[in-house]
Amino acid sequence: MEKIKFFWKKILQTGLWKLGLFFALIGPGIITSNVDNDAGGITTYSLAGAHYGLSLIWILIPVTVALIIIQEMCARMGVVSGKGLSDLIRERFGAKITFYLMIILLFANLGNTLCEFAGIAASMEIFGVSKYISVPAGAVFVWWLVVKGNYKSVEKVFLVACVFYLSYIVSGFMIHPDWSAISKAAITPSLNFDAGMLTMAIGIIGTTIAPWMQFYLQSSIVDKGLKAESYKYSRMDVIFGSITVNVVAFFIIMLCAVTLFQNGLKIETAKDAALALAPLAGSYASMLFAFGLLNASLFAASILPLSTAYTICEAFGWESSLNTKFVEAPQFYGLYSLMIFLGAGIILLPGVPLISIMFYSQVINGILLPFVLIFMLLLINDKRIMGDFVNGRLMNVVSWVTVMILIGLSVVMVVSAIWE
């Protein structure tokens, strides 16, 4: 009897220790994935649900698989090499290629940062707050959070921000949808060759797998100090993050499909969706949707400039860590500050062509993604960098097929955008 008690006690202690270790090591994967549900992502999912109902919700399943594959490779490179992605690209492919890649990424991320501050302005206007108050306040808050904190404190705030995405899930349950119809739509592919529907499908994929994500994930893993021994926990972190981000996307599409689409209401922005929900799903659902947009925009307005600072500083060999002070890493914090205050300042200018900025930033993302993915696959198979952690034969086949599909979709997105 004593042996049995000792046996179960040992199992319990081991299980709790492993669970505690997992929670200590998680963060980069969950944060990177969830921040992708930013103002642009929420707008895309809202439009998909409002314009096409449940027809495109099934896409989230293959997108989740693709995101797990891509993010797992980034996490593996981070824990094994101890270097960021832009650092590895510079070492393997040279400074000239890295320089041009960083210039393109800088403009794409600046455009995306503008979208986040536009999201802050739009969400706070629903609550009756002028953008001339909300945008400067938001900019100062996200700047102070990172510049005055360290990696641990910043990560804790980011993880709390991830929890607030539950507002979309709560809103989804509040409307009491027909779950049998939704379940059927989720597992039944339905895509015709209507140009608008195809563009929307590519938009869903494009907003879920963005170039900046790969750089940020690997940089944050390095900054957190994770090593090869932590790989299995980093992989679990990535898988959990990739699933949760698409669960939130699922509820946003479903919410807009069941309310707006079924009532024939068309929208153009996430703000329109939040306002249109009030008479259909109740004021609480509408306010939760607006709060979710505010949280997502603030979250991404912190991460996108941070990702840019990490990536460019690593590429040029400058100090890049949240565990340093401003005077120790002036380029890192200077870039972060520039991205935030430039993005916020432009949004406050009257007559800013925001739609054009969003449009061209997505086109740039579409151009950049194929190069980033190919660099990743070449690096992950380099034994000098990865040692025994290179891709196996099966993983290589799956990875290359996934990457080729994503590259094809990126090309279609760019061509269709320019053609229009």
Image: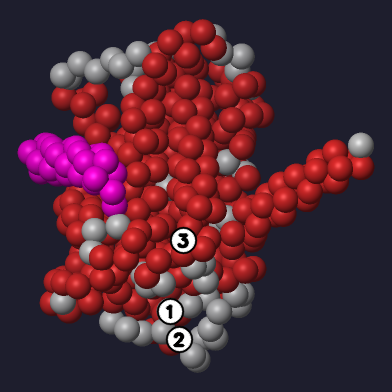
Q: Residues within 10 Å of mark 2 (few under 14, many from 20)?
A: some
Rendered residue at 92%/37% (across/down): 1
Position in image of residue 289 (x %, y %): 56, 35
Q: Residues within 10 Å of mark 1 (few under 14, many from 20)?
A: many
Residue 279 versus residue 224: which sits nearer the camera?
224
| Residue 320, numbered label | 1
Find the distance from the CA under tag 3 to the CA under tag 2. Answer: 18 Å
Find the distance from the CA under tag 1 to the CA under tag 3. Answer: 14 Å
Q: Which image quadrant: the C terminus?
A: top left
What range is drawn magenta here? 391-420
Residue 71 lies within the magenta run: no
Residue 406 lies within the magenta run: yes
Q: Between disc 3 and disc 2, whose residue precedes?
A: 3
Cβ atoms at labels 2 and 1 below 8 Å apart: yes
Position in image of residue 46 (x %, y %): 42, 30
Name the residue tied to disc 2: 329
Name the residue tied to disc 3: 303
Find the distance from the CA under tag 2 to the CA under tag 1. Answer: 6 Å
Position in image of residue 25 (x %, y %): 59, 59
Rendered residue at 18%/55% (across/down): 374
- Name the element at disc 3: helix
